[in-house]
Amino acid sequence: MKTTNLDKLENIRLTKENKQNIILIFKEGINNSLKHSKCSQIILEANIRGDVLEMVLKDNGIGMRSDEKIMGNGLRNMEERARIIGGKLKWRSVSNSGTTITFVGKIDSGNKLLYSVKRFLNVSN
């Protein structure tokens, strides 16, 4: 697994609920990539533009059919978690070219640091 720009998350403050939901969204996304995509590479990237956090998970696997996106409980749960915290989850999947999941949400003035995402995933660049 490769990461890009996760160091940018060290100074971002989110509420406990937002942090927990983001962690669970990407935990499920990584699990889906490992379990279903037959990928050889997973990339997790973080971007911050003003007060907007964008996190992107990409794999180079077999991709998903559009009906798989609708039917999967894990995917629905990820979308619901994003909605609960005021964010949006976008999907792009191309057959034999992988899947990209993008979370976009506003950064609030919560009490906890998002650096735990990096610690939870136990990844380094």
Image (tube, grey):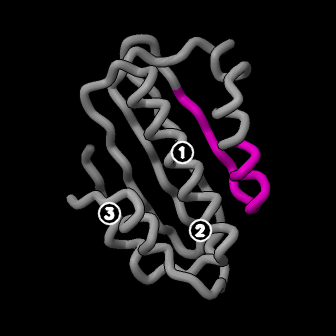
Q: Quadrant of the N terminus?
A: top left
Q: Residue 102 got which mark?
A: 1
Side of 71 where 44 appears, left or right? left
Q: Residue at x 66, y 67 (%)?
A: 18
Q: Residue at x 54, y 29 (%)?
A: 92
Per the model, the C-alpha gap separating discs 3 and 2 is 17 Å
Q: Residue furthest left?
A: 125
- Neighbour tally class for label 1: few under 14, some 14-19, many 20 plus, Cα within 10 Å: some
Mark 1 or 2 closer to N-term? Answer: 2
Magenta residues (range): 79-92
- Check disc 3 and report its element: helix, strand or loop: loop
- Viewer-proximal residue among 49 and 87: 87
- Residue at image mark 2: 19
Q: Are marks 1 and 2 in contact (CB under 8 Å)?
A: no
The correct choice, above or below, for 112 with respect to 124 in the image is below
Q: Residue 5 got which mark?
A: 3
Where does residue 108 sit, x and y in percent of width and height?
66, 78
- Residue type indicated by callout 1: Thr
Q: Residue at x 66, y 77 (%)?
A: 15
Residue 94 magenta: no
The correct choice, above or below, for 108 with respect to 91 in the image is below
- Residue type indicated by callout 3: Asn
